[in-house]
Amino acid sequence: MTAALRAVGLTKVWGAFAANSDVSLELAPGARHALIGPNGAGKTTFINLLTGSLPPTKGEVFLGETRVTRLTQHERVKLGMTRTFQINTLFEGLTVLESVMLAVCERTGAAWDWRHTAASRTREAAEAMELLRTLRLDSEAATITRQLPYGKQRLVEIALALATRPKLLLLDEPAAGIPAAETGEVFAVLAGLPADVTILFIEHDMELVFRFAERITVMVGGRVLMSGTPDEVSSDARVREVYLGDAQDA
Amino acid sequence: METGRWKPAEIAFWLVPVACYFLFPGYLVLGSQILAVALFALSLDLILGYAGIVSLGHAAFFGLGAYTAGLLSARWGWHEPLSALAAGGVIAAAAGFLASFLVVRGSDLTRLMVTLGIGLLLYEAANKAAFLTGGVDGLSGMANGKILGVWGFGLRGHTAYVYSFTILLILFVLVRRLIHSPFGLSLRGIREGRKRMPAIGAPVMWRLVAVYTVAAAIAGIAGALLAQTTQFVGLDVFSFQRSAELMIMVVLGGAGRLYGAILGAAVFMIVQDYLSGINPVYWQFWLGLLLVAMVLLARGGLMGALDALAARAKRR
């Protein structure tokens, strides 16, 4: 079966510093794959290279059978590759509904429509509201995004990504900054996504990683240290040494 | 989300220029100029207030529109006003489209410098091409034919006022529709979260190219309108001062509010007319004072101040 995502030898070099060196990764369709590693391991850089927000120094990215290395960010989104951000990157002055509607309109092509009011695009509005209901954000639909509590803003991050109907979802620490008691809510949403959506997520909370991921890739110093099942990763001596040691002992 | 329905306050707003036509028949020439400049301000608000593109050279498009209409009439004998107006818009739109590729990339500072540069280039080009434009003496000798073959431009400015008002209103309705549309929402998206837009699949550059071209077209029509109503085009249509004053008008009225641009242009020009009547040399002193007071005391310009007043009245 064709991999949902294939990164081949991705390298990003700034001067003498290599943020990513020869990183390769393959995700099966519908995979729930975690990317872990200590701070500075190059995980976010890798996501930036995959999505096209950074051009790679070397290497290729394939989405299904399509080579997307030279495509722009928005062209990759159109092909089904969407990301969320580690630090909320939202439309602060728009309401929650407007924000999600914006993403829905981009997907349907309605965003070029200048003749009808956005409010009259009932199909897009209904879809946006439905998505907000799924994420239990419907009561916040009319709230200006910047006025939302942080945890809810993290959910808007995910709502924006889901509105593009991704085939491949790249989540950069989706639960970052959310109180521990509320992280379950975020992952419950992700667990409820259709099985054919492939998910690659960066996460520091090992409990969440081991609960949610079917496979894990460990990055250290811009390189892939190993990939494997949660059991293989947790029993790997190198991983325990560089990253999991403290978490496992605790 | 805005439904796009016209609110009573909006209808009341548009009745003011209608009332002015009857109440101040001696000021219709000034009134026509205010309406043309209001249209120009509206075009800047579209890119500054909604898409977040700063510009110190928007007069470039205004000037192109003005010279297009001026040259058509004064040099090439084309006196039909509506087609000359449209020609001004088309030429400015073409220039806006080409310039947009330089403007939409880069930071605010880059944009300020590039737009400023384009304005200066055109100013000097018009100055140099004196055989065509009249150079520093300006382009005179324009004559307007009748509008739709019926209404002639008289000396007292009745036709010019109604003509300017109609053009402003039509283009305002179109811009208002654009702002409330999904396209307008995407412009606000770019202003509020430019980094996020590509990540939801938005071709930011093309969206900005589109709005910049539309704004340039409207600025061109505004320039052509002013040229037709004053029957003169001076080099100052391209001047830096015109671009800078335009930005003051939009900020004064409240950027990103549509009505703010029109209100800002009207207040600026009325105050300018009144103060320069009192003292033709030092009027900018009072204008400066007004501007500083507005920025410090009323966030969001005049429209922001009106909002604050309305909110206070509601609380009582």
Image (cartoon, rainbow, N blue to C red):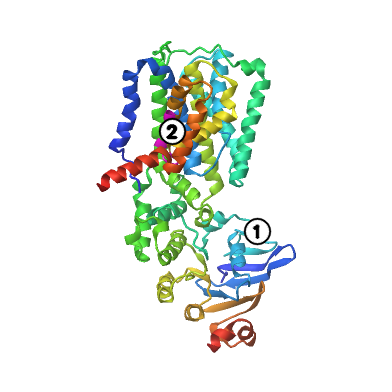
Local secondary structure at mark 1: loop
Horizontal side of B57 relative to A100 (left or right) equals right
Task: Kindly report which numbered mark, 1 or 2, lies closer to the viewer in this rendering.
Answer: 2
Chain letter behind tag 2: B
Residue found at x 74% / y 62%: A15
Q: Which residue is mark 2?
A: B264
Q: What separation in Å lies between label 1 and label 2 (alpha carbons)?
A: 44 Å
Query: Is B290 covered by the magenta stretch?
Result: no
Quadrant for residue B19, please give it.
Answer: top left
- Contact (CB < 8 A) between labels 1 and 2? no
Q: Residue B166 appears at what percent x and percent y? A: 39, 24
Q: Which three-letter amino acid code belongs to the residue tagged 1?
A: Pro
Horizontal side of B54 relative to A111 (left or right) equals right
> Residue A55 has which mark?
1
Residue found at x 46% / y 58%: A164
**A19 to B279, vertically: above or below:** below
Chain letter behind tag 1: A
Q: Residues within 10 Å of mark 1 (few under 14, many from 20)?
A: some
Q: Is residue B264 visible?
A: yes
Q: Residue A241 appears at what percent x and percent y? A: 63, 85
Q: Residue B13 appears at what percent x and percent y? A: 33, 32
Q: Is residue A114 visible?
A: no
Q: Which residues are magenta?
A: B254-267
